[in-house]
Image: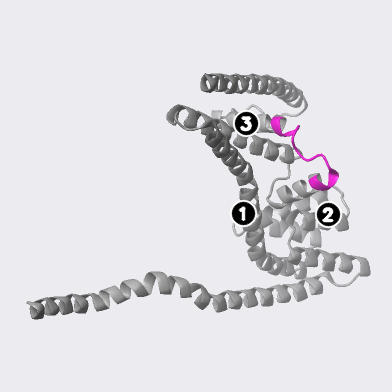
Amino acid sequence: MASPLLIAGLVCIAVLLAVYALLGIFEEQKQRDSMRNRLREVSEHIDINRKETSASWLHKSFMLLFARLGESVKPKKKKDLGKAESDLMHAGFRSKNAVAVFWGFKIGLALFGMTACLVTMLIFMGNVSYEVVAIVTLAVTLLFLYLPGVWLNWRISVRKDNISRGLPDALDLLVVCVEAGMGLDAAIDRVGMEMRAKCQELSDELKMLSLELRAGKARREALKNLAERIGIDDVNSLVALLIQADIFGTSVALTLRVYADTMRTKRFQRAEEQAAKLPVKLLFPLIFFILPPLFIVIMGPAVIRLMKVFNVVGQ
């Protein structure tokens, strides 16, 4: 009797959550339609009549559901909230409700894992004791709760690595633009356009920096925001040099050229380091996957012939 009641309770909870999410989605859609009507009256150049595909509508609906679910469980302390916002910013998520969406996704994934595990074990494994069901369900729930954090760390690592690889090329382009007579703000905007095919992440950050400068934000503050969004030591050093050059009135072109040479040297040293690590990394695949088949191919026929000889001699 316990398993049908448990399944019925889970179904009721799921239905309530779905109804709550749909009510929130309809309210959000109503506000969005009202805002569209106002924008249509103000400007005719904004294309707000484009049709949204079902996939985009479903994506926005899920984002709204996760945001509402995560709003009540996201970190409340200022320190923890700042750490979560910084991690999401380093991963490329700059939305105001990114923390709520992320925590809502974590809770939703954990609830999905718990429900799927309970239903699977109670329906297809009816003879399992409730203690085992509780332990396995708890383990699966914790696993699903932990997986989004692992994915976020992986995304941060990949994004920082891509930006680190594209930064020397961006610096070279910036040096060329500044030495050609362009101002630093115009050079940043131009480099952001040119780097789009090479490094999308760095191009987006440079375009964001250019937009902040166009909006009238002070260059020091905009550069500090760039370093905070990316979170790489090389970018922090570059921002510190540019701020010092702006304060003391030194040549920006000379500063960028010196730092570009330094970055080029560091990239060459990083490549040499990776090449030096290659023999050590190849050691274990060589021992466990290459040498054993090689020995089998070389010694196999001789061993088979010896076995035949010994059989003949024994007879």
Q: In this view, which residue lies farthest toward the right?
A: 248
Q: Disc 1 marks which residue?
A: 154
The quadrant of the picture occupied by the C terminus is bottom left
Badge 2 vs badge 1, beta-carbon distance below 8 Å: no
Q: Residues within 10 Å of mark 3 (few under 14, many from 20)?
A: some
Q: Quadrant of residue 34?
A: top right
176 is higher (above) or lower (below) than 59? below
Q: Is residue 94 left or right of residue 135?
A: right
Question: Which residue is more in the foreground, 290 or 24?
Answer: 290
**Label 3 belongs to which residue?**
62
Q: Callout 3, which amino acid?
A: Phe
Q: Secondary structure at mark 3?
A: helix
In this rendering, the count of numbered labels is 3
Give the label, 1 or 3, closer to the camera.
1
Question: Which percent across, then down, holds residue 129?
Answer: 50, 32
Task: Give the secondary structure at mark 1.
Answer: helix
Per the model, the C-alpha gap separating discs 2 and 3 is 33 Å
Q: Position of residue 286 (x, y in %)?
A: 42, 74
Would you say residue 214 is visible in this rendering?
A: yes
Say which element carries label 2. helix
Which residue position is annotated with label 2?
222
Q: Amino acid at mark 1?
A: Trp
- In the shown orientation, is residue 52 left or right of residue 220? left
Residue 290 found in image quarter: bottom left
* Relative depth, front residue between 138 and 256: 138
Residue range in magenta is: 69-80
